[in-house]
Amino acid sequence: MTVVEVGGGGFRPYDVVVGRGLLAGAGARIAHLARGRTVVVSDETVAALHGPALQASLTAAGVASQMIAVPPGEGSKSFAELERLMDRLLAAGLDRKDVIVALGGGVVGDLAGLAAALYMRGIDFVQVPTTLLAQVDSSVGGKTAIDTPRGKNLVGAFHQPRLVLADIAVLSTLPPVQLRSGWAEVLKHGLIGDAPFFDWLAGDGAVGATGDPAALERAVIRSVEIKSAIVGEDEKEAGRRALLNLGHTFGHAIEAELGFEEAALAHGEAVALGCCMAFRFSVRQGLCGAAEAGRVEAVVAVAGLPTRLAQAGAFSAEALLERMAGDKKAEGGGLTLILARAIGDAFTMRISDPAPVLAFLREEGAA
Ligand code: GLY
């Protein structure tokens, strides 16, 4: 078991505990925070799989709990589901000393976290992420949000959890596509700022992408360390935190064009493809060597993740560019991309003239 402290910023520090079999002892850890009761917010699938173990451990630790399960899937990150959840929390009679526990993937964490930020102007919450993507990314750093018809994650709040419990054992029930999807975010962390970590992911650590628990544990720990160092420095994404969006501006545009259909392309698959495109665009701009981009592509491919636009579908270059410029990271008309000088050396670049991006998208196969 490893504990990574997230802190150093303008928020109360908290622990991310990473280990195998943490669910059984979760109640004792949560009992330190919950003076009264907890409501566990989960989705119907995860609640059935892991809810009984978590609630039994809460009971054993003397913490009363109630389960609220929302429908699985991105559709639950909506105003309608948020309203339904707030109403259920109010009906449960939670007060400001009680704690919400988010048990699930990114959707549950984002929705329950936002509900915790809003409930009586903010109550404590604990993240128990059950997907690799949530363990290495969305459960850490305090971003919470719902989607609107105008875009993803456009309504939300920064609300840091009090504790994150990342149990590697629960990843054994994940479908392979979800494991691969989370692995893309792991690779991203190496690409941003840790070349030796990326070397390990490309070599001995590669078995993590297919579920090896020891490799997964090491990958989660290092990812959380990298992310927590960035978040501690820049909680509200005024600067350095934007690096965590490597692969996301291309990736979000692709996902948006596909209608955010998980069946068409999982989020991590879009991020992996976006990382390859960001490296290739960096080469095109003369910022990065072609061999580096080639290596990124090879490692992404070995993990079973897409590297080329054609693997995701057929796209219009103008439509993708419009999506990229409309991305929430765009400011003042241009667009902001996370590019790289090398593996482990990412940086933010403002692009005011979109022509090279459009030409690049055409080279990539967009019409
Ligand atoms: N997922 C990117 C961030 O937390 O900033």
Image (cartoon, rainbow, N blue to C red):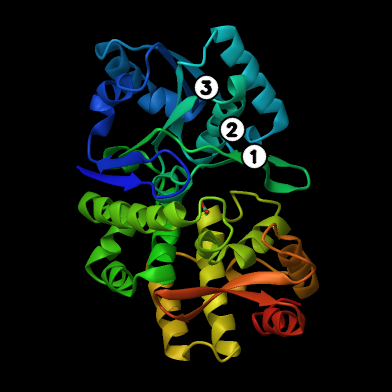
SS assignment at label 2: helix
Residue flagged by tag 1: what amino acid is it?
Gly
Residue identified by numbered label 2: 114
Q: CA distance from mark 3 to mark 2?
A: 16 Å
Q: Residue at x 64, y 49 (%)?
A: 261
CA distance for labels 2 and 1: 6 Å
Q: Nearer the viewer, mark 3 or mark 2?
A: 2
Is residue 275 in view from this perspective? yes
Q: Which label number is shown at residue 69?
A: 3
Amino acid on which the number 3 mark rests in the picture: Ala
From the viewer's perspective, tell me whether residue 167 is left or right of residue 304. Answer: left
> What element does badge 3 sit on?
strand
Evaluate if marks 3 and 2 touch, with contact meaning CB atoms under 8 Å apart.
no
Looking at marks 2 and 1 on the same chain, the residue that comes earlier in the sequence is marked by 2
Q: From the viewer's perspective, is 203 left or right of 93?
A: left
In this rendering, which labeled residue sits more in front, label 1 or label 3? 1
Q: Is residue 92 above or below residue 202?
A: above
Q: Which residue is more in the foreground, 5 or 210?
A: 5
Q: Residues within 10 Å of mark 1 (few under 14, many from 20)?
A: some
Dividing the image into 4 quarters, which one contains the N terminus?
top left
Residue where numbered disc 1 is placed: 156
Q: Circle 2: is it few (<14), some (14-19), or many (20+) Cα within 10 Å?
A: many
Q: Amino acid at mark 2?
A: Leu
Q: From what the image shows, is residue 119 above or below residue 300?
A: above
